[in-house]
Amino acid sequence: MSVIANAFMRRFVEFINTADETLGNELIANDAIFHVPNQSEPMQGVAGYLAIIGMMRSGFPDIQWTLEETIAEEDKLGAGDTRIAARFTMRGTHQGDFFGVPATGKSIAVPAVNFYRVSKDKIVEERGQPDLLSLMQQIGAAPIS
């Protein structure tokens, strides 16, 4: 199971690092739901995920995600789904407006932990948990305590 989950997640990282819509369509269900911090309504499908990537790239055009660790298990309720927890590091340079903070030119290295539900070899749900406080501290928009 973990070998399959790792291969799947490597392809997913290729998608988020390239924003390749064709690859996104191979990996993401049309009705997939993405829960995004600071948004009241989830994003949906490949277009929704590309919008999330676009929002990050508007502030950090060179942003790249590195997959650090994955844990996967099959759903015990018989639905045949796989649950994947993935730990990433997001790296980039603050070169554009991000949440109202003008470009600073500062580099970031921000941890994120995301939870995925995969059904029939496609992501059907994601809950993303980037460390936004750390990101805002690294660009000088929040105090470091």
Image: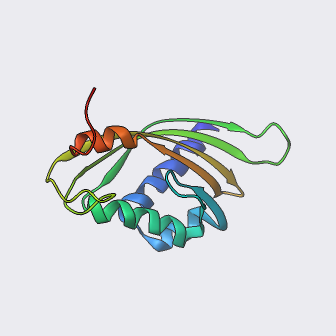
At 49% across and 67% down in the image, what residue appears?
A: 23
Decide if residue 67 is in sight here. no
Q: Is residue 10 above or below residue 44?
A: above
Locate the N terminus by quadrant.
top right
Locate the C terminus by quadrant.
top left
Depth check, front residue: 38 or 69:
38
| Residue sticking out furthest to the left | 105
Q: Is residue 87 above or below residue 79?
A: above
| Residue sticking out furthest to the right | 78
The image quarter in which residue 55 lies: bottom left
Name the side, left or right, on which 19 lies relative to 93.
right
Depth check, front residue: 106 or 39:
39
Name the side, left or right, on which 91 lies relative to 76.
left
Q: Position of residue 54 (x, y in %)?
A: 38, 67
Q: Is residue 125 above or below residue 68?
A: below
Q: Position of residue 106 (x, y in %)?
A: 16, 48
Q: How many marks?
A: 0
Q: Position of residue 62 (x, y in %)?
A: 24, 59
At 30% across and 44% down in the image, what residue appears?
A: 136
- Specify how the rendered protein is coloured: rainbow
Decide if residue 131 is in sight here. yes
Name the side, left or right, on which 20 lies relative to 109.
right
